[in-house]
Image (spheres, rainbow, N blue to C red):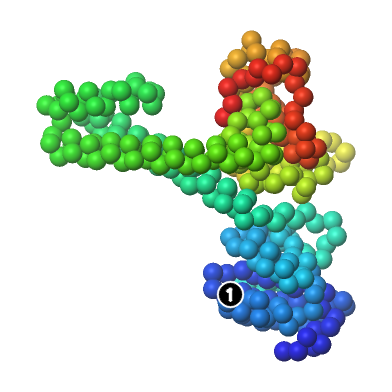
Amino acid sequence: MAKNDFDELMSVGIDIGKDVFHLVGFDKEGQLVLRKKIKRMALVATFEELPRCIVGMEACMSAHFVSRTLRELGFEPRIIPAVYVQPFNKGQKNDYNDAEAIAEAALRPNLKTVSEKTQEQLDLQALHRVRSRLVSRRTATMNQIRAFLIEQGITVRRSVAALRTSLQAILDHRDDEMSLRMRKLILGLQQDWIWTDRRIEMTTSEIKSVSESEASCQRLVTIPGIGPIISTAVVAAVGTGEAYDRGRDFAAWLGLVPRQHSTGGRTILGRITKRGSRYLRMLFVQAAQVIMMRPNNWHKFSLGPWLEAAATRMQHNKLGVALANKLARIAWSVLNSGKDFDWKKKEFATAI
């Protein structure tokens, strides 16, 4: 395959697989001139023989690695959300049809693409994913302990602290109410819980250390309700926010805006879309709930007057989502401007 065989190559779509990539390329006339299946290890060798052009790929695992590799070779990679590729897919689903749809979508001038993540962002994102999995595992372990205790007629108050303080006493003094085998099972689950707690503490400590050394994270923690966890999660997801034109777009990506079903000039708004990052959306809503728990502190924030006025006309959960939307837009503004959040006083609510 000689480079001059594809002098008119305009765009290439890559359908990324675990071991095999499918390539489809179009020339300037929109004609299909490349259709090829390659091994992952042959990626660099294959593209070194192609003229420099636009290369599209869906946002998926290893997309950022492939994008960085191709950019170093002089190509113009574009990482496209899968939802924007789907309208270009023709016929039944297969790898070549997917690659063709990606190649066509990559040529759209107004298409929103995913910003390429650095290795540091991917590392930080991995830390958050590990921590999230460990927290879910800890919750599942605690729920299983509660379920086994209830089956033995033993109930514990509904809080993590209550179960943590009561479990050892139950095992020591109420062993006559459960069989030896059940006691051993619960002891094993208790050890799992302790081990998971330690892993969560280690991962959280590493995230906090990154937050203290990263300038963007330090600017984000000046926003009320935002601490090391949210600041590092935002930086890992969007970097400096250059992929969005304004804070409203960032909030829309998080799914914190109403779903529209408007027609005939009539605007119909429903529940929030819940698109984009579920993890980040959850964190921003939690931050909003923390702020709302302390209404006596609202006057300390520059957004306090807005929050006090909104509280008089909105239901509690709706207000929480509206505040989360506002925090997300402020976070984008802080990242984009490179300046700290400007509040009235330096005291703010407990951060997450």
Whether 29 is drawn above or below 336: the answer is below
Whether 308 is drawn above or below 49: the answer is above
| Residue 236 spot, x, y in % from top left | 63, 46
| Residue 17 spot, x, y in % from top left | 57, 69
| Residue 302 spot, x, y in % from top left | 76, 19
In the rendered image, the quadrant that contains the N terminus is bottom right
The foreground one among 41 and 58 is 41
Q: Is residue 17 left or right of 328 when viewed as pictured?
A: left
In terms of image quadrants, where is residue 270?
Answer: top right
Which residue in the structure is indicated by mark 1?
40
Q: Is residue 241 left or right of 291 when viewed as pictured?
A: right
| Residue 333 spot, x, y in % from top left | 78, 35
In terms of image quadrants, where is residue 255?
Answer: top right
Point 58% across, 17% down: residue = 293
Amino acid type, mark 1: Arg
Whether 111 is drawn above or below 277: the answer is below
Is label 1 in a helix, a strand or a loop? helix
Point 31% across, 23% down: residue = 165
Neighbourhood count class around disc 1 (C-alpha, 10 Å): few under 14, some 14–19, many 20 upward: some
In the rendered image, the quadrant that contains the C terminus is top right
